[in-house]
């Protein structure tokens, strides 16, 4: 007989670590937190610039790829997902971004009671430890540290000024409900080091006797008995084990992992399951559907008379200086989030709230993982915050070790192509303002030869790439066909919830880490309220 716990949490990522903390806090429940990856005790996890070395690294990344994307002119993309304690909070860009009030109000309007902006704001605040202290929008004393960045670049200050000249107001905070404006991003760092969910939520409670953490332990399926959860089947140290549950199983494996586990368990579309020889236990054709992601278009400029990371990182003295500054001060380029400056704007006058987000970087390269260019460079990476395109994630084998098919279906909606063209035009309008003239910016990519809307639509498919924000594959809703209800229970199964980015019915307007934490915070309250002793 395997071990028995009150709660089993599948995935020690962004959501799972917080949930483990909350569900074990009262000491009344035994909690098992299961993670397929290993320890976060790896220096590149904690040095902020280390995200460059964690993505594409089998120690920390699932190494997924998308299917070939018609909208990207036949290209497939690497699709990093955290396979390590802390999940994507251990390898992401550390940007603290909640999205906009309108995002959550839309969820409420879709029938998800309790998920409006006013409903969710207290959960954001509850976990937060903001450098600004407590106020109407921010919390103090929570586990999740939100700080200012520890570096500055003149060229980014100039781009900020140029955005203002282009009619975009300067603001201080992107997290008060309306993001329209230009500002520096706030980051999840502490004293120049990454702040991941292991540091925030697990290390302070490592001695709780009612919490068991199992790493390098991969869940292959949920064990069901007459549509009720009994436990999970796991592979650990090359052996098959069963772990049983008294109360609930909570999937926190993300927008790729959670639908994968559901389908391997016989919960999903019978047509997909039948082809793989998996018996359908619970039918739901929407599991794995509704995949949304932010597609970024990296508009790159070659500059003159500018200091950028390109020069610093491409010389021996520059590298030495970067290393010494970080070693002694925990500042400088090694403390950098991938993006420092943000701009939220509308692609045209038909939008009431921003539908574009820029991540502006004092560097340029062909793609992450490749060397920086040998000229002073700036990248204005822009993404459509509200894509209409929808894709899917589905298993292709009954073997849990086989990666699922990931098809984001980028730029399949005509409106997304129109917004892509408009976003490149806006990048050009900002860069052409007086504040940037001293750098004599020359467009390196996509290139000024692309001018017409049709040309820009096509080139968007050539340069577009993921900014790593998949959501929606176990979307909540008030319809019996939705995967989860507004309390995050999986429809048709007793004792099973999903509490990660996959439950989002529509993608939030910005980086998705903070909203995922909020989902876990709210989920913990709902779980504890329905499991009172």
Image: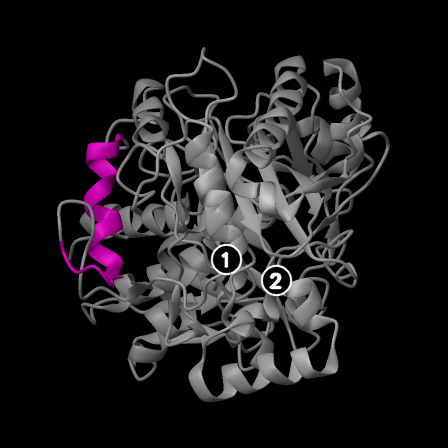
| Above or below: residue 340 compared with residue 29 | above
Is residue 281 shown to the viewer in this render?
Answer: no
Figure check: 240 above or below 346? below
Residue at image location 60% in from the left, 65% down from the top: 51
> Along the line of sight, which residue is nearer the eye, 323 or 278?
323
Residue farthest top in this picture: 350
Q: Residue furthest front?
A: 438
Pick whichever, 2 or 310, lies toward us: 310
Indicate the position of residue 339 as horizontal and vertical percent values: 53, 54
Which stretch did the figure color magenta? 116-134
Is 164 left or right of 74, judged from the image as shown? Answer: left
Observer-nearest of 310 and 3: 310
Q: How many labels does the image show?
A: 2
Q: Which residue sits at x=37%, y=66%?
A: 5
Q: Distance between the residues labelled 1 and 2?
A: 8 Å
Q: Is residue 64 left or right of residue 386?
A: right
According to the picture, the residue beneath numbered tag 2 turns out to be 307
Q: Is residue 264 above or below residue 448?
A: below
Q: Is residue 456 above or below residue 324?
A: above
For marks 1 and 2 on the same chain, the one whose residue lies earlier in the sequence: 1
Where is residue 176 drawn, in percent x and y? 26, 40
Q: Quadrant of the C terminus?
A: bottom left
Asked if residue 42 is among those painted magenta in the image, a careful observer would answer no
Residue in the image at 62% along x and 61% along y: 308
Task: Classify mark 2: helix, strand or loop.
Answer: loop
**Helix, strand or loop for disc 1:** helix
- Asked if labels 2 and 1 touch by Cβ distance under 8 angstroms, the answer is yes
Q: Is residue 483 visible?
A: yes
Q: Nearer the viewer, residue 493 or 431?
A: 431
Q: Does the stretch in magenta take in 120?
A: yes
Image spot of residue 447 (x, y percent): 79, 34
Check disc 1 and report the residue beneath it: 154
């Amino acid at each position: 007989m395997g071990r028995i716990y009150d709660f089993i949490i599948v995935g020690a990522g962004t959501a799972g670590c917080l949930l483990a903390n909350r569900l074990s806090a009262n000491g009344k429940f035994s909690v098992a937190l299961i993670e397929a990856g290993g320890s976060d005790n790896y220096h590149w996890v904690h040095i902020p610039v280390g995200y460059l070395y964690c993505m594409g690294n089998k120690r920390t990344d699932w190494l997924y790829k998308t299917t070939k994307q018609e909208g990207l002119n036949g290209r497939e993309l690497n699709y990093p997902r955290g396979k390590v304690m802390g999940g994507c909070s251990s390898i992401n860009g550390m940007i603290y971004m909640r999205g906009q009030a309108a995002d959550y109000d839309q969820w409420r309007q879709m029938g998800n009671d309790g998920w409006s902006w006013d409903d969710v704001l207290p959960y954001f605040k509850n976990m937060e430890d903001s450098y600004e202290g407590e106020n109407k929008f921010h919390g103090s004393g929570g586990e999740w540290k939100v700080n200012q960045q520890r570096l500055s670049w003149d060229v980014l200050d100039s781009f900020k000024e140029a955005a203002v000249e282009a009619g975009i107001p300067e603001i201080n905070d992107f997290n008060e409900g309306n993001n329209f404006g230009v500002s520096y991003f706030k980051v999840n760092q502490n004293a120049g080091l990454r702040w991941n969910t292991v540091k925030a939520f697990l290390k302070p409670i490592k001695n709780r006797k009612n919490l068991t953490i199992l790493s390098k332990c991969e869940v292959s399926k949920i064990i069901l008995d007459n549509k009720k959860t009994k436990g999970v089947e796991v592979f650990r140290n090359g052996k098959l084990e069963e772990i049983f549950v008294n109360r609930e199983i909570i999937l926190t494996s993300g927008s790729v992992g959670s639908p994968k586990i559901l389908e391997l368990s016989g919960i999903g579309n019978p047509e997909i399951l039948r082809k793989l020889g998996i018996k359908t236990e619970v039918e739901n054709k929407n599991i794995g559907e509704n995949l949304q992601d932010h597609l970024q278009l990296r508009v790159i400029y070659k500059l003159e008379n500018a200091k950028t990371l390109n020069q610093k990182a491409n010389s021996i003295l520059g590298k030495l200086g970067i290393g010494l500054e970080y070693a002694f001060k925990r500042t400088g380029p090694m403390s950098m989030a991938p993006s420092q400056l943000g701009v939220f704007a509308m692609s045209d006058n038909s939008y009431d709230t921003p539908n574009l987000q820029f991540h502006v970087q004092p560097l340029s390269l062909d793609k992450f993982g490749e060397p920086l260019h040998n000229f002073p460079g700036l990248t204005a990476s822009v993404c459509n915050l509200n894509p209409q395109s929808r894709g899917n994630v589905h298993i292709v084998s009954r073997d849990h070790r086989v990666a699922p098919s990931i098809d984001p279906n980028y730029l399949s909606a005509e409106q997304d192509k129109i917004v892509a063209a408009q976003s490149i035009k806006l990048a050009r309008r900002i860069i052409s303002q007086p504040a940037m003239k001293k750098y004599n910016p020359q467009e390196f990519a996509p290139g000024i030869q692309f001018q017409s809307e049709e040309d820009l639509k096509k080139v968007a498919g050539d340069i577009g790439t993921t900014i790593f924000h998949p959501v929606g594959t176990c979307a909540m809703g008030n319809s019996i066909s939705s995967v989860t209800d507004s309390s995050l229970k999986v429809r048709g199964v007793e004792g099973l919830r999903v509490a990660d980015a996959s439950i989002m019915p529509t993608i939030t307007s910005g980086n998705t880490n903070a909203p995922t934490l909020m989902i876990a915070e709210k989920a913990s309250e709902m779980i504890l309220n329905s499991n009172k002793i």
